[in-house]
Image: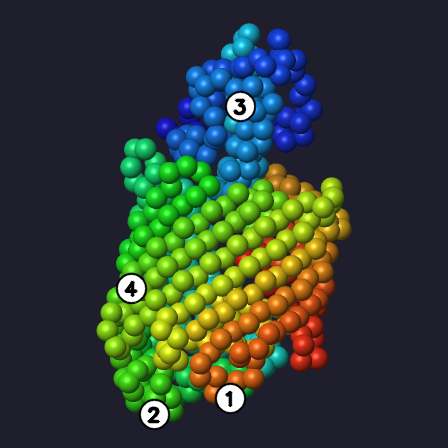
Amino acid sequence: MPGNENQLSGKRLTDSAAASVNITLPGSGSEDKFRVRNIIIVGNKRTRPDIILREIPFKPGEPYLLPDLVKRFEDARRQLMNTSLFLHVVVALKSFDGYDVDVLVDVRERWYIFPIPYFRPVDRNINQWIIEQKGSLDRVNYGAKLLYNNATGRNDKLRFWIMNGYTKQLSFSYDRLYIDKRMQWGLNMGFNIGKNREINYNTIDNKQVFFKDSRYVRNFSNGNVEVTYRPAIKTRHRFGIAYVSEELSDTVVKLNPGYFQPSRTRVTVPEIYYTMSYYDLDYIPYPTKGYAAEVSLGKEGFNHILNMWQLTAKGSGNWHTGKKSFFTLNGYGVIKLPFKQPYYNQRLLGYDDAFLQGYEYYVIDGTAATYLKAVYTRKLFNFSVNVPGGKKREAQRIPFTFYGKIYGNMGYVYNPEPGDNFLINKMLYSTGIGIDLITYYDFTLKLEWSFNQLGQNGIFLHRKSIF
């Protein structure tokens, strides 16, 4: 059983203890190779050992030069931390017998199940909700959600949401990383069903325009099934099929006949897609070194009602410029074909995680877009808060790390039918300064003071890091 295998006697190594261990190996010259005899895992009360071994870039019985083996220790620690399964990981030499070495992998697991209440504004960011919508509780979703990570010990994820308020919605998803013995193929699936009394039916002056009624004006449902393939460690391929069903009231279509084409109140369309993602980062929730990329190609609809090809590419590079500083470049590009699309398919910048800093109060619709973001970041200070333990829980050390940064953005959105929107078909620029907070369970909070080319500035909150 997980947690009962490969147990060691004695105390668990800590990060500081592992760093202070200094062992001299026999004949440890640069040309001497050492064979990994055993990989000993401790601390995995729930996580299965094969899930941990899947992330380790060395295997028992294989010979390695000492510098290469030490580097692989750090790679293994980084990969295990990036699984989001553990609070701390130590990968270190435990013992040796001549040129045979035993490796210790010591993990400290997270809490995996979160049955928690749900309360969240529906607007695109917290600033829009507070400033433009006056913090209206009518624009809030509330309910309950169950997040069950590592449900079977295989790093699988179960999600169940029941939501009321602005949107009445029921959601379910299950993500299983591996379904085969070689641990390369995975499967995930999900569905959503819900309805709204208000809908964003148009964009004027780069602002969302809403229609609200006492009756429900939008009903929706969608579902998807996805197969994943991960042949090694850093790259994953995803192949998916999905369906989307949207139904609007007659009033909405009268207000914007181009919401769907041609003047339809309901669409049900299939979708197929492929996504390739690559991550080689020191810490995915807040990378300071390494590279990431994602490319996606999808086809939505197969007739005149909805017919769109979409190609999206994202990239991120992070380089250390000193012991406490690093430089980041993030790029994004998307194209939708044919260029003439109904309003339903024109959302680009300002929605979800694709945005330009300094333009948080605007949305920019179109069928092609690109942006580049440059950031220089420096670590300011860090500290920890100790939380005493009890009879059934260990003492906790909650870290807080603060970074200061300066940044600049440039981007462009193309729309063949711009209408009454002044940010389309022109270069856009912004800059700013900010402070980032990183703490427990990968929580990231970004406080930014941004300036755009319209002469506007403001303080904004964000959480997204990559891309």
Label 1 close to label 4 by CB (< 8 Å): no
Of the residues under marks 2 and 4, which one precedes in the sequence?
2
Say which residue label 3 marks. 104
Between the residue at mark 1 and the residue at mark 2, the CA separation in whole angstroms equals 18 Å
Label 1: how many Cα within 10 Å (few below 14, some 14–19, many 20+): few
Q: Position of residue 449 (x, y in %)?
A: 70, 68
From the image, state whether disc 3 or disc 2 is nearer to you: 2
Mark yes or no: residue 364 visible.
Answer: yes
Occupied quadrant, residue 16: top right
Label 4: how many Cα within 10 Å (few below 14, some 14–19, many 20+): some
Between the residue at mark 2 and the residue at mark 4, the CA separation in whole angstroms equals 27 Å
Between the residue at mark 3 and the residue at mark 4, the CA separation in whole angstroms equals 46 Å
Q: Secondary structure at mark 2?
A: helix
Q: Secondary structure at mark 4?
A: strand
Viewer-proximal residue among 28 and 118? 28
Q: Identify which residue is drawn at 62% across, 16% down.
A: 30
- Is residue 430 depicted above or below 207 in this figure? above
Say which residue label 4 marks. 271
Say which residue label 2 marks. 254
- Is residue 208 depicted above or below 107 in this figure? below
Q: Identify which residue is drawn at 47% across, 47% down.
A: 278
Q: Secondary structure at mark 3?
A: strand
Of the residues under marks 3 and 2, which one precedes in the sequence?
3
